[in-house]
Image (spheres, grey):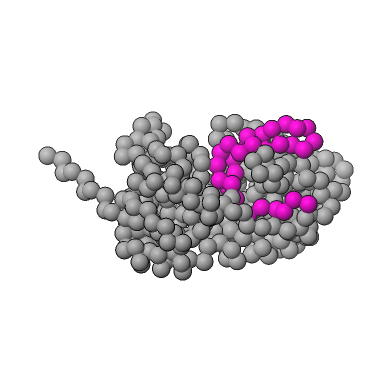
């Protein structure tokens, strides 16, 4: 006779403002896991979200109620391991069905030592975060007072260097395209590397690499990736950008876009609860064309704050700045993720634009 699986252990999620949610512990066993709690509205792609290094320091709450129904597959991870602090779901699927799957989501979380909590009223949690803003929280099997103390002791992401936790230790090469690109790893996703690898042979370098070392490689272009946390803490990358813009074509995505703005003298700010989802509408200012985009950021560039640029894209939900190009230089950035394919692939053209920029610069030289 097959032994019955042990019943899940009761667990709590406690936010720093004292709000309490009851649930059950799943994933890796944890007494206390703390981090900044944010919600993501995707209906699929949960493995890609969980493994995105941009979530370092954060606990991910999924608004879609059923998570895990198609399991996980090794090829779908965006990094070698998740960097998030934990996962919150309404209903974790106990069985999965997918011919590609090599593990369940619960097994994936256990293997990577990521704790999770299920049975949470995620609608109430999402409404609370929308009203109060993203905030620190703690979950686990510890008692309520212990979890509340952990939540209130959690520093969140403001003023914390999270890029240093996720960047590569040493340079490595990816892709085999005809151009040469140096990519700063601020928390780079594997799908970004796949897109860049179709265009170029990509040398991925640590986030603190000086511009002189990059230019010594004689690249056709330089890319600044997505990544976690407060952009003002990535000062080495900002300093490198100040030297690179105007010397070589530059393309930045998400955090890379924010760092480009700071390098040019612009300002960034922390949003109330950020953009985390797979269907965010963005309008191109020049054409009026609407792109349905994937986004994951808690910080944004202040519209009108960046000197010497043309603002190219804005979010239709809140008018926030989503992209700009640098006047008189081959450099541009977008806040959203053109490499992601949550269904639509509306924004993939930005990689082609980067390739055209590199080719034009190479011909002119």
- Image quarter for residue 259? bottom right
> How many numbered marks, from 0 up?
0
Judged by its main secondary structure, the magenta piece is strand
Q: Is residue 303 magenta?
A: yes
Residue 354: horizontal and vertical position, in percent? 74, 41
Which residue is rendered at x = 58% and y = 58% of the image?
229
Left or right: where 3 falls relative to 325: left
Looking at the image, which is closer to me, 344 or 222?
A: 344
Q: Could you tell me which residue is drawn at 33 percent across and 50 percent down? A: 23
| Residue at the outermost front position | 131
Q: Could you say which is closer to the camera, residue 215 or residue 334?
A: 334
> Which residue: 78% across, 45% down?
311
The answer to whether residue 76 is above or below residue 128 is above
**Residue 4 appears in which quarter of the rendering?**
top left
Work out whether residue 52 or residue 192 is closer to the camera in this orientation and state it.
Answer: 52
- Quadrant that contains the N terminus: top left
Q: Which residues are magenta?
A: 275-304
Please state which of residues 297 and 359 is positioned toward the viewer in this rendering. Answer: 297
Please provide percent x and percent y for residue 305. 77, 55
Residue 332 visible at all: yes
> What residue appears at the point 84 percent right and 52 percent down from the top-left corner?
308
As drawn, 352 above or below 193: above
User: Is any atom of residue 340 visible in this view?
Assistant: no
- Indicate the position of residue 238 as horizontal and vertical percent values: 71, 61
> In the picture provided, is 74 more to the left or to the right than 52?
left
Query: Residue 104 in the image: x percent, y percent?
Result: 35, 41
**Residue 299 highlighted magenta (yes or no):** yes
Q: Is residue 7 left or right of residue 14?
A: left
Image quadrant where residue 337 sits: top right
């Amino acid at each position: 006779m097959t032994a019955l699986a042990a019943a899940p252990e009761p667990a709590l999620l406690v936010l720093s403002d004292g709000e309490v949610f009851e649930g059950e512990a799943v994933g890796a066993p944890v007494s206390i896991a703390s981090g900044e709690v944010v919600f993501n509205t995707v209906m699929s792609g949960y493995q890609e979200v969980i493994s995105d290094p941009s979530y370092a320091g954060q606990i991910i709450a999924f608004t879609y109620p059923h998570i895990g129904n198609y399991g996980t597959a090794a090829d779908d991870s965006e990094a070698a391991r998740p960097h998030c602090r934990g996962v919150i779901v309404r209903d974790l699927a106990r069985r999965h069905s997918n011919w590609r799957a090599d593990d369940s989501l619960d097994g994936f979380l256990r293997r990577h030592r990521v704790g999770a909590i299920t049975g949470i009223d995620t609608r109430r949690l999402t409404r609370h975060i929308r009203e109060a803003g993203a905030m620190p929280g703690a979950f686990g099997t510890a008692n309520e007072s212990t979890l509340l103390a952990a939540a209130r002791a959690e520093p969140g992401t403001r003023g914390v260097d999270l890029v240093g936790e996720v960047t590569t230790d040493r340079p490595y090469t990816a892709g085999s395209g005809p151009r040469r690109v140096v990519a700063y790893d601020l928390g780079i996703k594997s799908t970004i590397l796949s897109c860049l690898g179709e265009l170029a042979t990509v040398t991925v370098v640590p986030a603190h690499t000086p511009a002189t070392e990059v230019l010594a490689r004689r690249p056709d272009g330089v890319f600044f990736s997505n990544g976690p946390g407060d952009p003002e803490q990535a000062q080495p990358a900002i300093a490198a950008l100040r030297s690179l813009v105007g010397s070589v074509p530059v393309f930045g995505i998400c955090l890379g876009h924010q760092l480009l703005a700071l390098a040019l003298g612009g300002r960034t700010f922390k949003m109330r609860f950020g953009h985390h989802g797979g269907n965010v509408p963005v309008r191109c200012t020049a054409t009026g064309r609407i792109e349905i985009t994937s986004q994951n950021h808690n910080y944004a560039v202040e519209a009108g704050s960046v000197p010497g640029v043309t603002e190219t894209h804005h979010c239709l939900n809140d008018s926030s700045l989503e992209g700009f190009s640098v006047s008189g230089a081959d450099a541009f950035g977008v806040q959203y993720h053109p490499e992601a394919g949550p269904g639509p692939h509306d924004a993939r053209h930005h990689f082609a634009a980067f390739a055209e920029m590199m080719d034009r610069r190479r011909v002119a030289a």
